[in-house]
Image (cartoon, grey):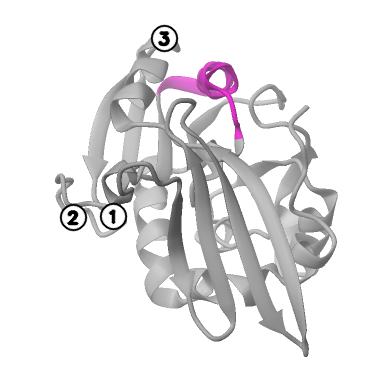
Amino acid sequence: MAANYFDGWIAERYSTLWAHLFEPHVVEPAVELLSELAGTGPALELGIGTGRLALTLTQRGIPVHGIELSPAMVQQLRRQPGSDRIDVTIGDFATTRVAGTFTLAYLVRNTIMNLTTQDAQVECFRNVALHLGPDGFFAIEVVIPPWQRLPAGERVIPFDVSAEHLGFDEIDVATQRSVSHHYWFLEGETKRFSAPFRFVWPSELDLMARLAGMRLHERWGGWNREPFTSDCGSHISVWQKLA
C-alpha cells in the first residue's frame, strides 16, 4: 500500500491551497475532453481526491467511480452537492480493483507520480487495462521531468515563490525520484508539507501502456489540445486498449 500524504490539514484545505485548479478555465477544458473520451461512460478516476473533476462529469450524466487512498480527501468530497452519485473505493489505485467495466480511466495533476517506483507505475497501467472495456481510453495529465532546468551539480528547482507559498523540488536524476517541499504562510502560521514523487517520461509511459495492452491514441500539450512540442512543460496523453 502506498503512503498517504494527503490527509488532515492538507485535505481540509486542499481547495484553498491549490485554488487555481478549481477555476473554470482549468476545470472546463479538462471535463470537456474527458467527457468526449468517456462517451456515455462509466468513467474511473484514479486518485479522485475531493472530486474536482468527477463532480462536473457526473453533472454531465457520466457515471464516475473513484479510487482514493486518503479517507480524509473522500470526506471533503462527500461534503459537495451531488457527491452521493459518485461511488468511491478506498485503496491504492495501482492495485485496487472495483466492479464493472469502464469506457475511460483517468489520472490528473501528476497523480501518476505519487507512485514512487517504476514497478508501481507499470502495475497501475495493468490495473487500468483490467478495468477498461474493448477500445476504452486511459488519460493522464503529468509534467515533463524538468532536468533541463537543473544547473550542473544542483538538485533543487523552485516551482513557486510567492508571499503565501514557497515550493521546490529536490531531485535525484539517477532514480527519477523527487521530494516536493511546500511552505505555506497562512492563518498566521507556517505549515510545511513534503511528499515523494517519481518523474516519468512520455516515452516511458508509452512503453508501460504497451506492456498493458494499450497504444498511444493522442498526446497534447494541454487540455485545450495544444500541440505537444519540446517546449511543453506537461502533457495530456491518451492510450486506447487494444480490442
Q: Residue at x 59, y 62 (%)?
A: 52
Residue range highlighted in magenta: 115-135
Q: In this view, does 207 lie above or below 233?
A: above
Q: Residue at x 26, y 45 (%)?
A: 148
Q: Residues within 10 Å of mark 1 (few under 14, many from 20)?
A: some
Quarter of the image with the N terminus in it: top right
Label 2 to label 1, Cα distance in Å? 6 Å
Asked if the residue at tag 3 contacts the one at tag 1, i.e. Cβ–Cβ closer than 8 Å, the answer is: no
Q: Name the residue under label 1.
A: 222
Asked if the residue at tag 1 contacts the one at tag 2, i.e. Cβ–Cβ closer than 8 Å, the answer is: yes
Q: Is residue 117 above or below residue 190?
A: above
> Where residue 61 appears, x then y in whole percent?
53, 55
Label 2 to label 3, Cα distance in Å? 27 Å
Q: Is the magenta stretch mostly helix, strand or loop?
A: helix
Q: Is residue 229 left or right of residue 16?
A: left
Give amino acid for label 1: Gly
Q: Residues within 10 Å of mark 3 (few under 14, many from 20)?
A: some
Q: Could you tell me which secondary element the residue under label 2 belongs to?
A: loop
Q: Could you tell me which secondary element the residue under label 1 belongs to?
A: loop
> Where residue 11 appears, x then y in whole percent?
76, 62
Give amino acid for label 3: Leu
Q: Name the residue under label 3.
A: 211
Q: Mark 2 points at which residue?
A: 226
